[in-house]
Image: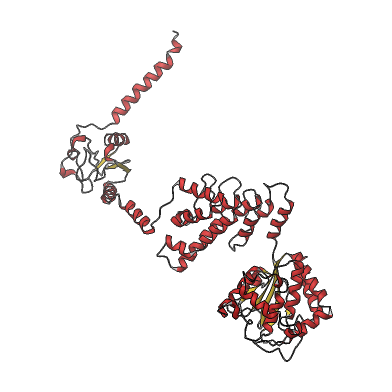
């Protein structure tokens, strides 16, 4: 073999031998004689090599006159059994190699080491470890167990959440209701966050329902989350304010928190993308739902309508119409009846909520009372209804109707226009105490319930307010004009009996009846919206806002 091949091997051998010699020279010798106790200072007199015991690892001691660069303290937890355990369970080293060697020999004792400046810092280090070792290691687990027991519910297993997800997708209302009722943790996760029903993408219950086009499941989940009794099962000691705060926080997360996929989409994105019209309507009806939230691609929900459903232009238009601002056309009256009713400017939903105060139905303008409303309508539909009202008010017959019936004349005219346009309509009835369209199934049910509460049997039914007919009966008769001939007396016996009583009178007789609540105003002044010019002005303002 050529000699130049052996030079690297020889060089490696020399380096190894040199390293061994240097390391052995740096190691402390076990036969170092300890100094006498008289030579130890107060700070250094806390451990002696004789106290080390079977480990035979002496403490490297240095006088204060010597300049010390490194000092390592190795402490053993007092609760651990080890061959080097003594009163202090603390050993000092100057060389880090000795520290490693000592720790390897005492693995079972879980040694802890730290670089310190002096013996006092080493004692502090040892005392802190002793305090930590003296504490009960089961305290934290017991505290966590107490917290779980105080709540009383544990997080469902993965197979249980899969069962709930499958039930939502299949539309099993009773199964979903039973599962949620068995453990509130199915909806309330850790930290009051939505429970994940599909791992990986981290879908919550609203994601699952919207993707499966299950509006009934979506409604069930949201109604449950709005139930205070549901939260009281989870947190029985919470105050009302805390419960409401938890409820608002969790509902906001359910509606607006995106999934963990690349697209980061909310339940509203899912409903729009898969063409779930009913789910979109349910989600947009929630005041906490924010349609302006964008997904991972920077798109809003209304930008991806029917993206996964092809060839559905009608469905696309219907969903897109739900995102448009809804308008309502109010009918306003003076509280004291000094002025005729008027058609107000179309308002948005937030303004309508301001008009509908819980104590009395009035507008922010003092003395104005909301008596009926057309809507919700799109901006185009609202403009069309306002234009129809402007044309109708020019006709002499409609003007006379308003003059002849100051209480419900304008409502009668606007009601006909709403019927022709297919627009939603509702008006306030004093004897029922709420806004309702009497010609709808809900209105008939409310009317039937009122008569049941006033009369014992259907045969005893006379009239709405008194034993004799009043103007209120005439107003109800007019409101039911479109459906009164088709009322089924078997389903609505009280309303059917009232209808039979009303058929005995002519229209002229009905118009002559008096109101039971208040007399017609003696002085009829022109209201703010009592002339066609004012109504046209309102329309121009409305159209200008749209442009």
Corner quadrant of residue 359: bottom right
Q: Which quarter of the picture shows residue 438?
A: bottom right
Q: Residue at x 56, y 54 (%)?
A: 206
Q: Nearer the viewer, residue 143 or 454?
A: 454
Rendering coords of residue 5 (x, y %): 45, 12
Query: Which residue occupies the extreme front position in the image?
Result: 459
In-front residue for pair 10/323: 323
Query: Which of 254/71 is in front?
Result: 254
Q: Could you tell me residue 170's position as x and y percent?
A: 56, 49
Q: Measuring 33% from the left and 52% from the top, which residue is drawn there? A: 140
Image quadrant containing the C terminus = bottom right
Q: Is residue 363 visible?
A: no
455 w.r.t. 44: above or below: below
Between 442 and 481, the one lying in front of the other is 481
Residue in the picture at 55% in, 46% down: 201
Q: Quadrant of residue 379?
A: bottom right
Residue 457 at x, y = what percent? 57, 78
Which residue is rendered at x = 44% and y = 55% of the image?
A: 182
Q: In the image as oriented, which residue stretches furthest toward the right?
A: 395
- Estimate the x, y position of residue 514 in percent, counting from the top left: 69, 88
Vertical relation: 349 (above or below) 40 = below
The residue most toward the bottom is 522
- Quadrant including the N terminus: top left
Q: How is the image coloured?
A: secondary structure
User: Is there any visible trace of residue 179 in the rendered image?
Assistant: yes
Query: Number of marks in the image?
Result: 0
């Amino acid at each position: 073999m050529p000699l130049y091949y052996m030079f690297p091997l020889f060089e490696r051998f020399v380096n190894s031998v040199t390293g061994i010699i240097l390391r052995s020279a740096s190691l402390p010798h076990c036969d170092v004689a300890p100094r006498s106790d008289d030579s130890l200072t107060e700070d250094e007199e806390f451990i002696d090599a004789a106290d080390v015991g079977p480990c035979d690892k002496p403490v490297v001691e240095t006088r204060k006159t010597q300049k010390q660069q490194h000092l390592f303290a190795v402490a053993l937890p007092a609760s651990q059994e080890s061959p080097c355990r003594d009163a202090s369970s603390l050993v000092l080293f100057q060389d880090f190699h000795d520290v490693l060697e000592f720790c390897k020999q005492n693995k079972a004792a879980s040694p802890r080491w730290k670089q310190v400046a002096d013996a006092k810092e080493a004692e502090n280090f040892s005392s802190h470890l002793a305090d930590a070792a003296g504490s009960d290691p089961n305290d934290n687990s017991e505290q966590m167990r107490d917290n779980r027991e105080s709540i009383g519910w544990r997080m469902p297993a993965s197979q249980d959440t899969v069962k709930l997800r499958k039930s939502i997708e299949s539309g099993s209302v009773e199964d979903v209701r039973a599962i949620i009722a068995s453990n509130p943790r199915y909806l309330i996760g850790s930290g009051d966050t939505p429970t994940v029903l599909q791992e990986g993408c981290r879908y919550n219950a609203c994601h699952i329902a919207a993707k499966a086009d299950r509006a009934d499941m979506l409604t069930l989940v949201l109604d449950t989350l709005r139930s205070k009794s549901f939260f009281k099962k989870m947190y029985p000691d919470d105050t009302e304010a805390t419960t409401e705060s938890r409820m608002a926080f969790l509902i906001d997360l359910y509606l607006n928190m995106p999934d963990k996929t690349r697209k980061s989409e909310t339940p509203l994105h899912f409903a729009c993308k898969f063409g779930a019209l009913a789910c979109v309507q349910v989600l947009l009806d929630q005041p906490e739902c924010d349609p302006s939230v964008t997904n991972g691609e920077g798109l809003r929900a209304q930008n991806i309508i029917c993206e996964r459903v092809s060839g559905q232009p009608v469905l696309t238009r219907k969903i897109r119409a739900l995102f448009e601002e809804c308008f309502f056309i109010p009918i306003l009256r003076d509280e004291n009846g000094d002025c005729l009713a008027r058609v107000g400017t179309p308002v948005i939903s937030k303004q309508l909520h301001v008009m509908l105060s819980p104590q009395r139905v009035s507008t922010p303008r003092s003395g104005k009372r909301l008596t009926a409303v057309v809507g919700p309508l799109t901006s185009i539909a609202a403009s069309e209804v306002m234009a129809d009202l402007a044309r109708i008010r020019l006709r002499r017959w409609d003007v006379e109707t308003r003059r002849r019936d100051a209480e419900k004349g304008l409502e009668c005219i606007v009601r006909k226009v709403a019927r022709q346009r297919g627009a939603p309509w509702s008006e306030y009835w004093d004897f029922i105490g709420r806004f309702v369209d009497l010609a709808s199934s809900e209105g008939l049910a409310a009317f039937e319930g009122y008569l049941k509460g006033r009369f014992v049997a259907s045969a005893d039914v006379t009239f709405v307010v008194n034993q004799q007919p009043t103007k209120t009966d005439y107003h109800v008769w007019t409101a039911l004009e479109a459906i009164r001939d088709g009322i089924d007396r078997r389903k609505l016996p009280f309303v059917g009996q009232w209808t039979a009583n009303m058929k005995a009178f002519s229209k002229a007789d009905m118009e002559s009846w008096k109101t039971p609540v208040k007399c017609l105003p003696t002085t009829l002044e022109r209201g703010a919206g009592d002339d066609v010019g004012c109504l046209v002005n309102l329309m121009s303002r409305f159209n200008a806002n749209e442009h």
